[in-house]
């Protein structure tokens, strides 16, 4: 046999071996994918468990509760969904006064928001307060420019000059119970009642940089009970403005409020600002100690027994949002709201 034919034979043999090995690897990979997919299908129910609405503790006497939300045209549907859920889960004797701080919304957006009064015309009022973009150095926010609309929070004492106390809620919230209990928290000596945020223990270096490590907590500004009267008395807006103008790369209004409010705060239960990001990802025993409350052993029960669920971080209208039961809950209210329009 000549060398030429020998080399050809070797090349053919090597090629055949490569083909066989390739087919074997492909078959093994496909089998692993099928097994993994089977596990996913088994662990992910086709019909997610549904959160049930809990009964309210209602009172005979009527009471007004002031609520403010901030939106632009992009966020009008989620904001309307949040308002809808609050109205559908309130007591008949609780009167909700909604104040909507609206930056650049359309007539269609206004109609969507105002229509919610019809759900309970005797006990629901909606006041839309149009606003232009604020005259502040947004560029100082740097990485966090997407939160610029939320900066209206720092001006609420001025915008709502005739209101002394108000519940602030982000538009990515769902209300499961009447808000009178939250509204009745005594904030007469503080600027706000707030709930802890897990950012504190996740980013200790950043907390130390803004001087909050000694305070022992960082709060989430997505749900707050605001004492507007005291903020006006102490001219707190001026201090908030000064922080915005003299600092850079801050986490929107949340960093500003955390630093400037200092110790003039009252901590409230996580149930009033139940953030799914932390309960899904962190150890519940650790979180019980952090929040200073005994948490249910199952995250599902944590949400079901909360008053306000806050979809901070990933949003339920995003395709791959988890857990499914929180996605189902949001769409339950959203679809009802849209059918009502």
Image (cartoon, rainbow, N blue to C red):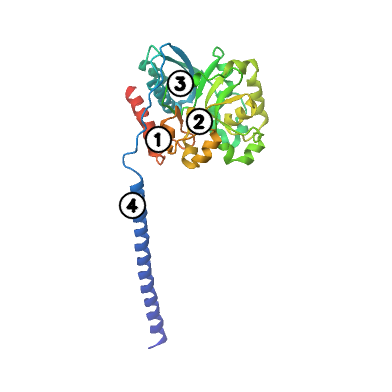
Q: Which circle's residue, 2 or 4, is located before the other in the chain?
A: 4
Q: Earlier in the sequence, mark 1 or mark 2?
A: 2
Secondary element under disc 1, as helix, strand or loop, is helix
Q: Is residue 105 above or below residue 26?
A: above
Query: Does the residue at mark 3 contact the one at mark 1 (Cβ under 8 Å)?
Result: no
Q: Give the total of numbered labels.
A: 4
Q: Which type of secondary structure does the marked residue at label 2 adopt?
A: helix
Q: Which residue is mark 1?
A: 326
**Residue at the disc numbered 2:** 270
The correct choice, above or below, for 201 with respect to 66 in the image is below
Name the residue tied to disc 4: 38
Which residue is located at x 39 percent, y 84 percent? Answer: 6
Marks 1 and 4 sit apart, C-alpha to C-alpha, by 23 Å
Q: Is residue 229 above or below residue 288?
A: above
CA–CA distance between discs 2 and 4? 36 Å
Q: CA distance from mark 1 to mark 2?
A: 17 Å
Residue identified by numbered label 3: 179
Q: Which mark is residue 61?
A: none
Residue in the picture at 55% in, 19% down: 186
Where is residue 311 shown, x and y percent of the image? 46, 33
Say what secondary structure mark 4 lies in: helix
Give the CA separation, mark 3 to mark 1: 20 Å
Instruction: Give whichever of discs 3 and 4 has the lower sequence position.
Output: 4
Q: Do we see residue 125 in this rendering?
A: no
Spatial CA distance of label 2 from label 3 is: 14 Å
Crowd band around label 1 with a 10 angstrom C-alpha radius: few (<14), some (14–19), many (20+):
many
Marks 2, 4: nearer the viewer: 2
Q: Nearer the viewer, mark 3 or mark 1?
A: 3
Of callouts 1 and 4, which one flags the residue occurring earlier in the amino acid sequence?
A: 4
């Amino acid at each position: 046999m000549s060398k030429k034919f020998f080399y050809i034979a070797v090349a053919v043999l090597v090629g055949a071996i490569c083909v066989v090995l390739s087919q074997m690897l492909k078959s093994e990979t496909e089998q692993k994918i099928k097994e993994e997919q089977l596990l996913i299908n088994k662990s992910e129910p086709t019909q997610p468990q549904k959160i049930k609405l809990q009964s309210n503790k209602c009172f005979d006497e009527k009471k007004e509760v002031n609520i403010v939300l901030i939106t632009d045209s992009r966020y009008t549907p989620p904001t309307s969904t949040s308002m809808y859920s609050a109205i559908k889960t309130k007591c008949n004797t609780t009167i909700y006064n909604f104040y909507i701080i609206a930056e650049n919304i359309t007539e269609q957006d206004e109609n969507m928001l105002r229509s919610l009064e019809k759900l309970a015309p005797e006990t629901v009022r909606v006041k839309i307060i149009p606003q232009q973009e604020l005259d502040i150095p947004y560029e100082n926010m740097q990485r966090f420019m997407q939160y610029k609309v939320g900066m209206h929070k720092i001006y609420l004492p001025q915008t709502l000059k005739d209101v002394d106390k108000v519940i602030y809620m982000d538009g990515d919230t769902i209300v499961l119970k009447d808000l009178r209990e939250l509204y009745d928290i005594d904030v007469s000596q503080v600027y706000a009642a707030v709930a802890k945020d897990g950012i504190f223990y996740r980013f200790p270096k950043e907390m130390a940089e803004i001087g909050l490590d000694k305070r022992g907590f960082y709060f989430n500004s997505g749900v707050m009970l605001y004492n507007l009267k005291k903020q006006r008395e102490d001219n707190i807006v001026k201090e908030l403005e000064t922080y915005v103008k003299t600092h850079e790369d801050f986490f929107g209004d949340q960093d500003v409020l955390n630093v400037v409010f200092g110790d003039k705060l009252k901590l409230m239960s996580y149930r009033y600002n139940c953030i799914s990001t932390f309960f899904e990802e962190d150890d519940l025993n650790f979180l019980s100690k952090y929040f200073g409350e005994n948490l249910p052993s199952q995250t599902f029960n944590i949400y079901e027994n909360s008053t306000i669920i806050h979809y901070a971080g990933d949003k339920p209208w995003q395709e791959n949002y988890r857990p499914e039961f929180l996605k189902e809950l949001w769409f339950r209210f959203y679809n009802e709201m849209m059918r009502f329009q």
